[in-house]
Amino acid sequence: MSDHRPLAGLRVIELGQLLAGPFTGTILGYFGAEVIKVEPPTGDPIRQWREVRDGTSLWYHSLARNKKSVTLDLKSERGQALAFELLCKADVVVENFRPGLMESWGLGPDAVKEKNPGVIYARISGYGQTGPFANKPGYASVTEGYGGFRYINGEPGQAPVRPNISMGDTLAGIHAALGVALAIIQRHQSGEGQVVDVALYESIFNLLEGIVPEFDGAGVIREPSGTTITGIVPTNTYLCKDGKHVVIGGNGDSIFKRLMTEAGRSDMAEDPELAHNPGRVVHQERIDKALSDWCAKHSSSDIINKLEAARVPVGPIYSVEDMLSDPHYNARGMFETVEINGEPLKIPAIMPKLSRTPGETHWPGASIGAHNQEILGGLLGLSNSEIAEL
């Protein structure tokens, strides 16, 4: 049966390691591309990060799903030559080494394009391929600060807070996959490939909404705002009687009236000074106190039930345990089960959802070099003795 996924028939060579480049490959492979992951003989370091079972991290089985693993020593001339052959047979190359390293190995986009003019070459780095900081090391943690996110994240007057994920890497991977998709569309029109240049800090910068024009046009620097968001009221997190928090978004004018009426504050619901968001911003402290006092008298489930009945956006703060037991997550197919050494393992589905050609997980992350024979022997034509010598 033919593969119905939208990127079926597309060959992607993934070089690099850890998260940003590999997550790009995960997205492309989930939606049908043949992704050949080139690893050093010791494997991608993420194979050993965090929770490890039977010698491989549980994370890796999700991140490397649908990928074929090939081992090559890119620091050797033979490894570089074989990698070049692979790149010349690729529709898409994804790499996240420091700028200039691929060129030093003879694997840069200009060299590959001479043999493979239609190649789409996605490059992911901390600061991009050009500019005065291009050669600076740039992990997600650093670029989240440089890209502006850390400045606005946290409580006023305290150290900026890091979310407990590598957000800059994942966002860069999403941006790279988007860039590849756009380049594929353009290649259908022109027949030519191109370089997709993704910087981690720019992927963060892309989230900043109105921060730049607000500063340039009004001289306003958006500061951290804790559990609220600047200039939109009320939207906050409130502690309930059972010790759990709920998030309430009551910033629409009609929603605000329903919220305050349900909270027993009809006086505020009908107050003309609070009828629209600019007025509510002025009186944010008073509104938040009224809602905090109300939530403190009720359990989180009571608050959620009351506000859902009143058609006010409200929700709990979920842990991963909550997600796995939630009926909506499960009804939406947010988890997929793979088998690792005879044991089931849940991994997250990859978004977005497509109605006619959805993505799929066909297999979890493979063992190191599991596809050497298929790729080095079948695709590149090496003999068994040559593969054994490698």
Image (cartoon, rainbow, N blue to C red):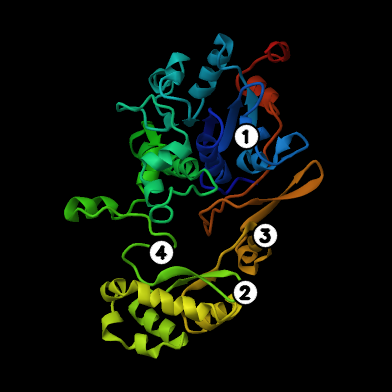
Q: Is residue 217 above or below residue 182?
A: below
Q: Residues within 10 Å of mark 3 (few under 14, many from 20)?
A: few
Gap between marks 3 and 1, in whole Å?
Answer: 23 Å
For the C terminus, give its image quadrant.
top right
Tell me if label 4 and label 3 are in contact, CB under 8 Å: no
Asked whether the beta carbons under mark 3 and mark 2 sit within 8 Å of each other, the answer is no
The image quarter in which residue 253 lies: bottom left
Is tag 3's residue or tag 1's residue first in the polypeptide sequence? 1
Residue depth check, mark 1 versus mark 4: number of the one nearer the observer: 4
Give me the C-alpha separation between circle 4 and circle 2. 22 Å
Residue position for label 2: 242
* Up/down of 381 relative to 186, above or below: above
Residue in front for this viewpoint, 231 or 345: 231
Label 2 sits on what residue type? Asp
- Return the x and y of residue 17 as percentages of the image width and height: 56, 30
Q: Which residue is mark 3?
A: 321
Alpha carbon of mark 3 to alpha carbon of mark 2: how far? 18 Å
User: Which mark is nearer the camera, 1 or 2?
Assistant: 2
- Looking at the image, tell me whether mark 1 or mark 4 is earlier in sequence order: 1
Q: Residue furthest right?
A: 342
Q: Residues within 10 Å of mark 1 (few under 14, many from 20)?
A: some
Q: Is 353 rendered above or below residue 165? A: below
CA neighbours of label 4 inside 10 A, class few (<14), some (14 to 19), many (20+): some
Counting residues from the start of the chain, the first of labels 3 and 2 encountered is 2
Q: Which residue does the numbered mark 4 point to in the structure image?
A: 228
Identify residue type, mark 4: Thr
At mark 3, the secondary structure is: helix
Q: Quadrant of residue 83?
A: top right
